[in-house]
Image: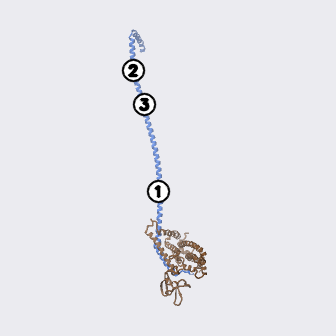
Amino acid sequence: MNLMLPDSGLLFWMTVIFAIVFFILAKFGFPVITGMVEKRTRRIDEALKSAREAEESLAGLAKEQEEMMERARAEHARILQDAAAERDRLIAGAQMQAAEQAGKLLEEARERIREEKEAALRDVRREVARISLEIAGEVVKKELASEEGQNEFLGKMLEEIPRLQS
Amino acid sequence: MRMPGIITLFLAIFLWGASSPAAFAGDADDDSVDVAHLLFSHIGDSYGWHITDWNGKHVSVPLPCIVRGSGGWHVFMSSEIAHGHVYEGFFIAEEGPYEGKIVELGSDGEIMRPFDISITKNVCSLMIASALLLALVLLCARWYRKNDAENEAPSGLAAAMEPLIMMVNDSVIKENIGKDYRRYAPYLLTVFFFILLNNLLGIVPFFPGGANVTGNIAVTFVLAMCTFIAVNVFGNRHYWKEILWPDVPMFLKFPIPIMQVIEIFGLIAKPFSLMVRLFANILAGHAMILGLVSVIFVTVKLGPVINGPMTFFTMLFGVFMDCLELLVAFIQAYVFTMLSAVFIGMSRQEEHAD
């Protein structure tokens, strides 16, 4: 059958044309394209890899940050606690000191009051004694004004001497 | 030969649909459409590129004929020998073993076939397709040369070609050949795009396309031969050992080399299957579409009642077939490339580590 027999002329031209096409494309066509695309693919792979690494390190950083914040919070709480304790201690100390001071003042005041009272009492006594002496003088004067009175007084005095001597 | 017999049968089945209207037309009177002639003149090669008939005149592109007859080289345009004209003793044989070919009348009245390397329709189509392919790929490559492909997305032609090139490169070539695929990638990519472009141009029904290039055995023969060379010339030691001294019981290979004969038969059968697969598929596609279109003209005789619906359904089928052929154009290019890659991959296999 005619269709199954390769024609020599077409065979010749096909060989020549295909050889030329193959030579040109294999030298200037496909390797350029595939080479560049493969290079690009490698570059994209690398970029993806470094992006992944950056993401990982970012995640690490976030974790570190979280830890730092946690630590800071703990520190904060601790400082607050310390401050509260210190405050309480100071207040208690101050209170105690104040109480002491007040007690001392009170004591002093009491002492002063007592001293004043004693002084006052001494004055009163002295006055009472002076007044009693005056009164007694007046009474003696009045009693000694009459004869009778003078005798009686003498008698009493005499009576009293032995008692005084004993 | 047995194999061509099978192919002929195979072809006959494919051509049956197309040739039955031809037989039908042959029974009618002389001015009926000679579908068989139409079909085979398209499927075969020709010296001029017939475009159409206009007012009873042939409109065709004349192509140069280059022949070496008894008196040395002769170069002339195909229009000189069209329609039975004789030019410098050369004419196109109407019948006989050289039907449709340029022959020369010898001095003793014997018809001789000169050495013929004319730029026929198929050659011309091959040249157009090749020029187109070179332009496409080189323009695409130019983009990669001029632009920084690492930082820029391809645009224009490069953007259109890149996915196809990389699809073939990555999923066909790299997958099947393995580690040293880079050595074969340019060849296989060239084969893929060469076949694809010729297939697609073959579907275009008017002038620059429409030639049955990849449905011609000479073209597929050269392509299959290239794969055969790529497989066998660069085959490694393991590959040749498997053919010449395979791991089978001794009686299968020593006194009578049974296995060797089978292996060598397989060696030839592989490219042969490549050649015939592409050839038969494209040929069948062309024949089917042409046969379908012919139905319109054949049924004119039967009157408008039959011709109308037939035309409608034929058009419908024609569109379907054309879409199918687009698919086949791609699939056949893909299959040829993939099988070539598989055969090359087999010839590059290293010995199994036992």
Q: Colour of chain B?
A: brown
* Label number found at residue A107: 3
Instruction: Give amino acid for label 1.
Output: Leu
Residue that appears at 47% across and 59% down: A53
Q: Earlier in the sequence, mark 2 or mark 3?
A: 3
Kind of element beneath mark 3: helix
> Pointer 2: what residue?
A127
Give the residue number, with chain letter if any, for mark 1. Answer: A58
Dot 1 or dot 3, earlier in sequence: 1
Q: How many marks?
A: 3
Secondary structure at badge 1 equals: helix
Secondary structure beneath label 2: helix
The chain assigned the colour blue in the figure is A
Residue placed furthest toward the bottom: B108
Q: Are marks 2 and 3 on the same chain?
A: yes
In this orientation, which residue lies closer to the viewer: A6 or B23?
B23
